[in-house]
Image (cartoon, rainbow, N blue to C red):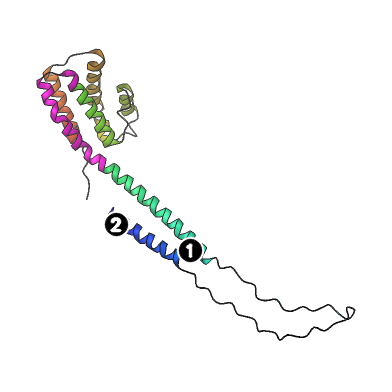
Amino acid sequence: MKYFIIILLLFITAFSTALQAEPVTAPLAMPQQTPAVPAVQQDTAKGPELFDIKGPIEITDNSKTIILTAAAIGLLILLAALLILWRKRAEKQRAVLAHETALQQLLQAQQLIDGHRVDAFITLIDQTLRSYIEQRFAISARRQTTREFITEITENTGSIPEPLARQNKNLQTWLEHCDLVKFARADLTTETMAEMLANLRSFIESTRMELKK
C-alpha cells in the first residue's frame, strides 16, 4: 500500500506543477508596418473605397486547459484504482484475521461448559460461528435466520465457496442446536456442548485463510 501512496504523492506534485506552469507559445509574427498613406478622396463612381489593413487576430491558446483537464482525469482514475485495491486488501485482511478472532472468542467456551451455562454457551457459539462465516466468506450470516442461511448454502451451491458448502450438514446441525436452546429452552448435555466446541474449532481451522506475502 505504501507504494501506491508514493505514486499518488508524485502524481499530485506533478499536477501542482502543471497548474503553476505557464504554457510556452510561439510569438505571433507581426505584419510589416504599412506606411501611412494620406487619404485621397476618390470618386465613388471610379471604384470602391479602400480601407487600412487590420491588425493580427489574437489566437487563444487552449493547451493549458487541455493539460489540466487530462491531469485531473488521470488523478481521478488513479484514486479510483487505489480505492479498489485498498478495499480488496482490506477484505482479504479481514478474512485472514477472522479465524484468529473466532478462536480467541472460543477460549471462554470451556468455562461455560464446566459451569453448564447452556444459554451463554449457545449464544457464544452462535455469534462466533456467524461472525466467522460473515468475515471469512463475505456472507451476511448474522442477519439471516437459520432457515434462510441453510437454504442459501444448500440450494445456491454454485455461488457458495466450496469449503463452506462441504460443511453444510454440520452447520445445519450446529445452528439447529442453537435455535432449540434459544427458542425452545432445550437443554444440552456436557458431552454435546464439548462436541460442538471441538467441531466448531475444527471447522474454523480447516477453513482458515492465510495471507500471501
Who's the residue at 49% across and 59% down the image?
A: 69
The answer to which image quadrant residue 181 occupies is: top left
Q: Is residue 68 left or right of residue 30?
A: left
**Residue 72, how many percent across, how many down?**
45, 57
Badge 2 or badge 1: first in the primary sequence: 2
Amino acid found under the numbered disc labelled 2: Tyr
Q: Which residues are magenta?
A: 93-120
Q: Is residue 73 left or right of residue 159?
A: right
Q: CA distance from mark 2 to mark 1?
A: 25 Å
**Residue 80, how many percent across, how many down?**
39, 50
Who's the residue at 65% across and 72% down the image?
A: 57
Q: How many marks?
A: 2
Q: Is residue 64 left or right of residue 9?
A: right
Residue 102 is covered by the magenta coloring? yes
Who's the residue at 72% across and 78% down the image?
A: 53
The residue lying toward the viewer, choosing from 155 and 113, is 113
Q: In the displayed structure, would residue 131 be above or below residue 40?
A: above
Extreme-front residue of the structure: 38
Element type at mark 1? helix
Q: Residues within 10 Å of mark 2 (few under 14, many from 20)?
A: few
- The residue singled out by tag 2 in the image is 3
**Residue 200, how many percent across, how many down?**
18, 28
The answer to which image quadrant residue 108 occupies is: top left
Residue 108 is covered by the magenta coloring? yes
**Residue 19, how many percent across, how many down?**
45, 63
Amino acid found under the numbered disc labelled 1: Ile
- The residue singled out by tag 1 in the image is 67
Q: In the displayed structure, would residue 124 be above or below residue 39?
A: above
Element type at mark 2? helix
